Image: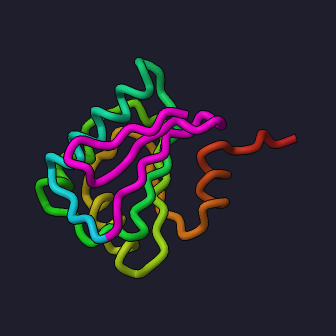
Amino acid sequence: MNLITVDGGKGTVELDSDGVLLLVWKPETVLTADDVHAAMASVNEIADGAEYPMLIDISNTQAVTRQAKSVFSVKCAASRIALLGSSPVSRVIANFAMARRTLPCPTRFFTSRDEAMNWLHPTPQA
């Protein structure tokens, strides 16, 4: 599908063929409030008024500023969010982003892409 570069160039957003929004931050990115606002604008642009589950790859993200953390409580086109990380640093970033905030949709951290995707698209129980 269409890949959009987030204003500022620190990440990309796309809607995949399974109906999942994918936000991938570039390696060593330090996320500021402006970066998060720009990403949310890109997500909303791609979603075009609809809501979709979203996978945010923070595997190589270096840090999140306090100002950026405050933006995470703002609603965007995500119906639920899976944060994907691969290191202790990404777990700290995810915990920092989710701590003491009322998040606008269910949000969880994963180290497995498959587990994250299964959570985003749960299989109906028989």
**Residue furthest to the right:** 126
Quarter of the figure with residue 66 = bottom left
Residue 6: say if magenta: yes
Quadrant location, the C terminus: top right
Q: Residue at x 14, y 46 (%)?
A: 34
Q: Residue at x 21, y 41 (%)?
A: 37
Q: Residue at x 81, y 43 (%)?
A: 125
Q: Position of residue 2 (x, y in %)?
A: 49, 33
Q: Residue at x 15, y 62 (%)?
A: 65
**Residue furthest to the left:** 67
**Residue furthest to the top:** 49
Decide if residue 18 is on the left or right side of residue 58: right
Q: Position of residue 59 (x, y in %)?
A: 43, 68
Q: Position of residue 29 (x, y in %)?
A: 26, 65
Vertical comparison of 18 with 23: above or below? above
Q: How is the image coloured?
A: rainbow
**Residue furthest to the bottom:** 88
Q: How many marks?
A: 0
Vertical comparison of 44 with 99: above or below? above
Q: Position of residue 36 (x, y in %)?
A: 24, 47
Quadrant location, the N terminus: top right
Residue 21: say if magenta: yes
Vertical comparison of 20 with 60: above or below? above
User: Which residues are the magenta region?
Assistant: 1-27
